[in-house]
Amino acid sequence: MIKDHFDEYFLAKKTAEDAISFLELEKFIGVFKGLQLSRRILWVAGNGGSASTASHMCTDFSKGLDENSRTNIKALCLNDSIPTTTAWANDVDYSSALGSYLRSVASPGDVVLAITGSGNSENVLDLLQCSKELGLISLSMTGFSGGKAARISDLNINVPSNDMQIIEDIHLSLCHWFMRFLKGDENV
C-alpha cells in the first residue's frame, strides 16, 4: 500500500514534468541571463507554499550561483519583508499589498516573477498588473490550467497538474534547475 501510493505520486509528478514547455524554459533562462548582465533586480512573490518557494529561489539566485558574487542575480522576495507587506495589507488592502510594495521599490529594467499554483490569487494578479503598469517584464510559474496569471504575464511556465503538492514540488525543482543551469553545473 505504501509503495503503491509512493509510485502513484511520483508517476503523477513525472507526467506533469514531462508536459512542461522547453520553449518557455529557454525564454526564462534568457531573462535570467539578462539579469545577470544588467544587474537589475528580480522581484519574486507568492502565497503560502509559493511564498516559501519564492524566498528559497531568491536565496539560491543571490548566493548559490556564484560564491564570489560575479554572476549572482539580485533577487529579492517581496514576501520576506513581512512588516512591509502586512503594512500595505492592513493600511490599503491585502489584494493589492504585493503590487503596492512593488510600486515603492521597483526600477525600470527590473523583472517580476509570480509563483502561484492556481494562477488566480488576487494579490498575485495585482502584482503582475502593477509590473505591466511599471513597464517591467513579468514572469509567472503556475499550475492547473495557468489561471489569469498565465494570461497576464509576459512569460509563463505552467505545471499542468490539479495537485497542489505536485505543482509546488515542480516549482521548487524548477528554481533549483534554473540555478544549476545558470551556474553551468556539469551535474545538471
Image (spheres, rainbow, N blue to C red):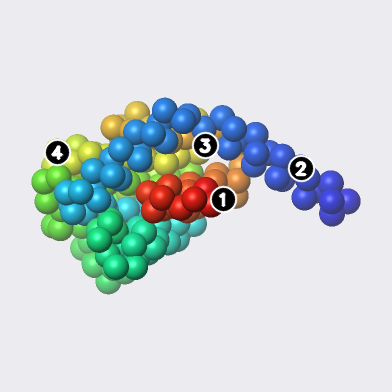
Residue type marked 1: Asp
Residue under label 3: 159
Asked if the residue under mark 4 is in contact with the one under mark 2, i.e. CB atoms within 8 Å, the reply is: no
- Residue behind mark 4: 135
Quarter of image, res 129: top left
Q: Which mark is residue 143?
A: none
Label at residue 169: 1
Q: Earlier in the sequence, mark 4 or mark 1?
A: 4
Tags 4 and 1 touching, CB below 8 Å: no
Q: Mark 3 is on which residue type? A: Val
Mark 2–mark 4 distance (CA, rounded to whole Å): 43 Å
Please state which amino acid type lies under the numbered disc 2.
Glu
Neighbours of disc 4 within 10 Å: few (<14), some (14-19), many (20+)? some
Image position of 23 with respect to 113: above or below: above
Q: Nearer the viewer, residue 50 or 64?
A: 64
Residue at 28%, 57% (x, y): give it.
Answer: 71
Q: Give the crowd class for mark 3: few <14, some 14-19, many >=20 residues within 10 Å.
A: many
